[in-house]
Amino acid sequence: MVSLPPFEYSIIIGLKLSDGHLQKGKLNKNARLSLSQSIKHVQFTGWLFSILAHYCQSLPYIYTTNLNGKVFYLLKFQTRSYPCFTLLHSAWYLNKVKVLPSNFFEDLTPIALAV
């Protein structure tokens, strides 16, 4: 089983508190981490990817979205599906809604807060 070292775990907790999300497909029993950021934050997204790249199958990619008639360019990457992400998904989601787990304060580290 793939496990998350403390540094990566703290980064993922920080992402869960901001723009990152864990998703489970209809046929997948395991979850994966997904992150989309504005192209303006390419350095931050690149730094995150450099740390989490060994969990990913492909490089970050650029895609566009349209919101209220305005086009936005985003940089996105996602990990492979692993049991370690499924454990986090079980703790952070209730009926497909993100919730704070009861042990939330135990996971707050300076790295998690910085991310």
Image: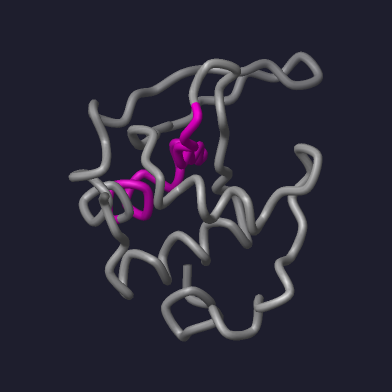
Quadrant of the rendered structure where residue 42 is? Answer: top left
| Residue 115 vertical position relative to residue 47 in the rendered view, above or below | below
| Residue 39 vertical position relative to residue 64 in the rendered view, above or below | below
| Residue 4 vertical position relative to residue 104 in the rendered view, above or below | above
Residue 95 relative to residue 93: left or right: right
Residue situated in front as seen by the camera: 37 or 103: 103
Q: Which residues fall within the magenta stretch?
A: 29-47
Which residue is at 31% across, 73% downward? 7
**Residue 74: in magenta span:** no
- Residue 28 image point, x, y percent: 49, 23
Quadrant of the rendered structure where residue 25 is? Answer: top right
**Residue 41: in magenta span:** yes
All told, the count of numbered labels is 0
| Colour mapping | one colour
Which residue is at 55% across, 42% downward? 22
| Residue 76 vertical position relative to residue 62 in the rendered view, above or below | below
Residue 38 relative to residue 5: left or right: right
Which residue is at 73% across, 74% downward? 102
- Residue 114 image point, x, y percent: 48, 75
Which residue is at 71% across, 67% downward? 101
- Residue 48 image point, x, y percent: 33, 54
- Residue 64 image point, x, y percent: 53, 17
Residue 49 relative to residue 18: left or right: left
Residue 18 relative to residue 95: left or right: left
